Amino acid sequence: MISNCVICNSQKLEPYKKNSQRKDILKCNECYLTFVNPTKVTTSSSRYKDGSFWESTNYNIKKMIQSDFTDEEGIHFANNFKSMYSYCNEFLINGKNILEIGAGTGVHLIMLDKIGFTVTGIEPDSQNSQLINDKLINGRCYTGNFQDIKFNTKFDIIWLYHVVEHIPQPDELLEYCYENLHDDGILIIAVPDCDNPESLIDSISNHDHLFHFSKNSLKILARNSNYKIEKCDSMSSIKELNKQRLNRFLKKGNLNFLNKKIWPYYPLKITDKNDGYEIRMILRKLQKKVVKKR
């Protein structure tokens, strides 16, 4: 039986009682992390390797990649990339080589490759990796788990988009990133915003999610892993129909500069309410190693 929070080490744990069908979920009343009890984790890493994970999403990855993310499903992924790129842009200016762990659909690698970055990816699903490699101009996507892949070079930027919540030991992932970043390198993270009760319910219902991060618990993980927090925000979806219509109107009128001014991170926006879809965090590697506070 686990007695301490895996992020902040607090003993203020209790069973998560708002989902009667999940008996394996714990909640920390100190850092507000909700997580699957490590002793009861049943999700196998092979699920990400054998295609089961992406098959269960019903996304047509091949069609999306071959269409350059212009098909009906791909547009959603392309828009989220543009939003994320705008959010990170000031930290990408001096970056040349980027590593993405958990490349998934490949949208980030492929788009960053087109922009001109030197990109490297890690993706457990061999079919996805091959599809991504067929599309990349100057980059490469390796097949496997991050723990099994060693690099002879370090990276300016490492990109983790909705990956950390899937990893049984997220501190090991951030340690891997630390060892593979240049001094002063940048780590970019996005996870579901589980300060939002609706997002928390959605995340818990996804059995592939092992961690349901609050902003506070994610900050503690980052600091304990020897990173400086440069930027951290909750992002909510722009759901108002009038705003969506205006966005489409401005696009059709080639007035994208207005779009960017009004909604720089469309289809998301920064929120200070508990209505976030995801937490975005930009970290800088600290050069001096410190002892982790657990």
Image (tube, rainbow, N blue to C red):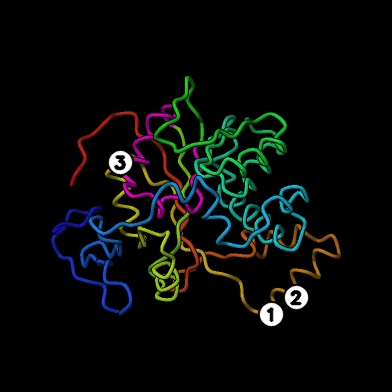
Q: In which quarter of the view is residue 77 placed?
A: bottom right
Label 2 SS: helix
- In the displayed structure, would residue 255 be above or below residue 87? below
Q: Position of residue 267 (x, y in %)?
A: 63, 65
Q: In which quarter of the view is residue 79 placed?
A: bottom right
Q: Are marks 1 and 2 in contact (CB under 8 Å)?
A: yes
Give the farthest residue toward the top: 152
Asked whether residue 13 is drawn in magenta, I would say no
Choose the circle earlier in sequence order: 3 or 2: 3
Q: What residue span does the magenta drawing correspond to?
A: 158-184
For marks 1 and 3, give the CA distance: 41 Å
Q: Position of residue 7 (x, y in %)?
A: 25, 53
Identify the amino acid type marked 3: Ser
153 with respect to 294 (left or right): right
Give the farthest residue toward the right: 253
- In the displayed structure, would residue 242 be above or below residue 205? below
Mark 3 highlights which residue? 225
Residue at the spot 64% in from the left edge and 63% down from the top edge: 266
Mark 2 highlights which residue? 245
Label 3 SS: loop
Crowd class of label 1 (few under 14; some 14 to 19; many from 20; radius 10 Å): few
Residue at the spot 55% in from the left edge and 50% down from the top edge: 51
Mark 1 highlights which residue? 241
